[in-house]
Amino acid sequence: MTEKLKRISDLEERILSCVAVGDCRGALKGSFKNPFLEAACPMRDHGPGFEAFFARGRFTLARALLDKKIEPSEGLADVIYQCTLCGACREVCNNPESPCMSISARENIGDHIEIWEALRADLVDLGVAPLPRHKEIIKHEIVEHNPYFEKHNDRLNWIPKDFKFLSKGGDALFFVGCTSAYRLNIISSTFLEIANKSGINLSISPEEWCCGSVNLRTGGEDIFKDLAEHNLTVFKDSEVAKIVTTCAGCYRTLKNDYPKYLEDWDFEVLHSIEMIDELLNSGEIKIAKKIDGVITYHDPCHLGRHSGIYDAPRNVIDAIRKDEFVEMRRIRNYSYCCGAGGGVKSGFPDLALEIAVDRIQEAEETGAKFLTTVCPFCLTNFKDAIKEIKSDLIVIDLLELVNKVIK
Amino acid sequence: MTLYDELVNIVSEKYCTDKDYVCVTYARGLDPCLPEIIPQIVIRPESTEQISEIVAIAKIHKTAILPRGGGCGLMGGSKPIKKETILLDLTRMDKILDIDELNHTVTVQCGINWSRLNAKLFDKGFYTGNMGPGSGLNASIGGGLSHHSGGGGGCAKYGKCTENCVGLEVILGTGDVITLGSQESRFVEKPFTRLGFGSDLMGIFLGDNGTMGIKTTATLKIFPKPPFFSGKTFFIKDNSYEKTRDMVQEMIAKGWAKSLGIYDFFYTPPPSVMGITTDKLIETWGDIKGGVIFYVIEAFDEKVLNRNTQILENIAKKYCTRELGPSIEEGNITDWFYGEQGHWQVYHPLFSVMGPDYFAATTEVMVPISRFPRILHKLDEWEEEHHEALFEADAESGVSHVVMLNHNSCYIGSGLAASHDEDLKTDVINLWKEQFELLLKEGAVLYMCGQIGSHVIVDSRIYSENYYKFFKKVKNIVDPDNIISPGKFRF
């Protein structure tokens, strides 16, 4: 069995570094000067709340597997997969990023998410994971290279006829991603429209496959590698050095995961909102009017906590708003997850919806008219939540707001 | 019906489990040294009524119940000692029931943690004064009250957290629910004082290490939070135990918390500083060799703060070699911990720094101020005498910190850092017990006892014979079947 726990065996030192203080269960950090901040694990308020659902418990589970105190089982997998891989646990992990403290548990443990993903991949090897719904998705991914049970050949059907794009070359390759290609076409078409308006030449490849995020997050490392290698070939053929995407999930995968798996990876990866921020700064995009109504912003985990992009979307909002921009209670690295990530939306749709409702209610507290974000996956979950609780909040991708006000 | 089925009927299947892959996560505490036994069942009740029903069922099945809050115990207090245990995870009981701004109290369910409670209180301009145990922001109110906890901030001014408890609801091992403090009266509207109706029976349940009953609701005093604070860090070269004691005595003579607003006072002895600087844990301290003290003071008026800052600085300068600061970058860790990060549990982060190779087996005790230099010297001697045994057990001994408690006593954070080697665990446990015994026989008092500390108290005959007899009789009254936290204090 230990051979099949290779990944977590390799990470054993990091796993042992958790001393089980348990701040990941729901501690808040505040100070005499600053308000308390909460990097809340969504499972705190939306699961059964047993230790096994928090980072401390998951480290213990990894140890218990290695020590053979428990056997791998589908029940265990069910617990391990009830996690959005949002990374809030990493933020709250007991050592502060102190200028005084040069060594910290955070450094010893490293990236929690990497450990959760390794645990899932090992459970897949042991035959007790992924969850049935994830298996169906993976099966489809192998044939049609998307998780939405759509045909690969329909991937570019979203492109409006009168919009311009290149088949290769240009300023950047637009990596559309599956959600924008098959479900939220408005995001991809809006970005292409903005690019057309501002004279940015984007190329789009019909050979683009799913970035593989869904597979990597749910333990399907082998399929992820196949998808990544294929996409690398596509990128090389595209004759560009820069890749831009509108999806936070694709962004994290291309920016952070591809370099780890692909030896000759040498591409600059941008999120579309970073590009817009640059274009606004350089004056290549001109604002003709401003958005009426209070705006609030949700930091997608993949773009924020996982990739450190917090300012670009806020800069853009500042540039386009007429009324106030009101932050939610939990923002930036302390942002609350939308509930959709880590295979939770497909594996546990009710749980994903419950978490999204929580976040929507938090957004409502700001009094905003618009809840904006830059991740189609978050957006999808939020739209479901809006419907569920009949909220008046307008959930909208930030690109759409930008497109409303530029020349 | 099985025990499990009966318990599921109380809380539903969602909050009750006998699955090994869930229960195994409760076999662990902050000490990875004592045996890790997986409880039979873990249950997460949401109300006093549910717990009362759980106790009634446990009584019929003669099964042990182990209450657990944040699971931050350092001495095995929240770890089962036998498989046949219902582990009561109390973290679902985390509601703030009432904040009484007029009478300065807060009533909470005992499963809420100290940081969440204080976050709410800060919003209203209050705090609990004592900010909870040093073991973590995740530690629960119930856990703190069960251990006379402190060290997490505010001890110099507010003492132990139990000193601020004015109301308590407890479920006994008989299943009876009792309220203590002013709520003993059927006619008192809200809890406001612990003392009043004859004997202080609440005291039986405070610092009981979870043995006398299950704490469900508590009322604590709250305090208006002073808007101004400052903190300083100083380095003391050589012989700093006595110097620190003398410095503290002079500060006490000048008014301590009452006049000078001292909120916290920490002392890190030279060996601990050496460990910190050798491993470059606090880089801004450079390679100083000696002790370090820091204090934080509060005031409602900036002028008062400045005046007190000056008074204390004058005293500190008499005893200390130089100031580490005033900025964070120059080594003033108070501004980071209290000002920026809010991580009052200053030594808490250091626990993890030891991982993955070492873990902490702590022997935390309380002593009167005059005694702490002697205790520290005794611990140094003990370390020297046990040099070989420590080496063989791959362990190190030391004192990480001394935290002033009110104006007359202090917490000493001592113990071992030991390796994870399974073969050496018995040796480490023996050394751990030996150090407990030394401290207790030197007149120290254990507050967080857990399994190991409570056993040493009894086995080493620290209690007087009459007291222990009385203690057992009281336990027998409140928990006649010995189902709540059995094993501690050799019950």
Image (tube, coloured by chain):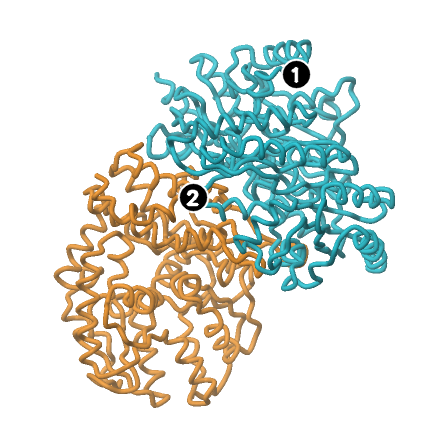
Chain colours: A orange, B cyan
Looking at the image, how many numbered discs can be counted on the residues? 2
Taking A262 as reference, is B212 above or below it? above
Residue at the outermost right position: B254
Q: Quadrant of residue B470?
A: top right
**Which is more toward the observer, B285 or B471?**
B285
Q: Where, quadrant-wise, is the C terminus of chain A in this rendering?
A: bottom left
Taking A367 as reference, is B402 above or below it? above
Taking B149 as reference, is A149 above or below it? below
Q: Are marks 2 and 1 on the same chain?
A: yes
Q: Quadrant of residue B449?
A: top right
- Say which residue appears at 48% left-offset and 50% top-offset: A93
Provide the residue designation for mark 2: B357
Chain for disc number 1: B
Q: Where, quadrant-wise, is the N terminus of chain A in this rendering?
A: top left
Q: Give how far across and how far down residue A195 sits, in percent.
A: 34, 84
In the rendered structure, the answer to whether residue B237 lies left or right of residue B15 reads right
Mark sitting on residue A265: none
- Secondary structure at badge 2 equals loop
Provide the residue designation for mark 1: B463
Mark 2 near mark 1, Cβ–Cβ under 8 Å? no
Viewer can see residue A240: yes
- Say which residue appears at 65% left-offset and 41% top-offset: B151
Q: Give how far across and how far down residue A246 sits, in percent.
A: 34, 72
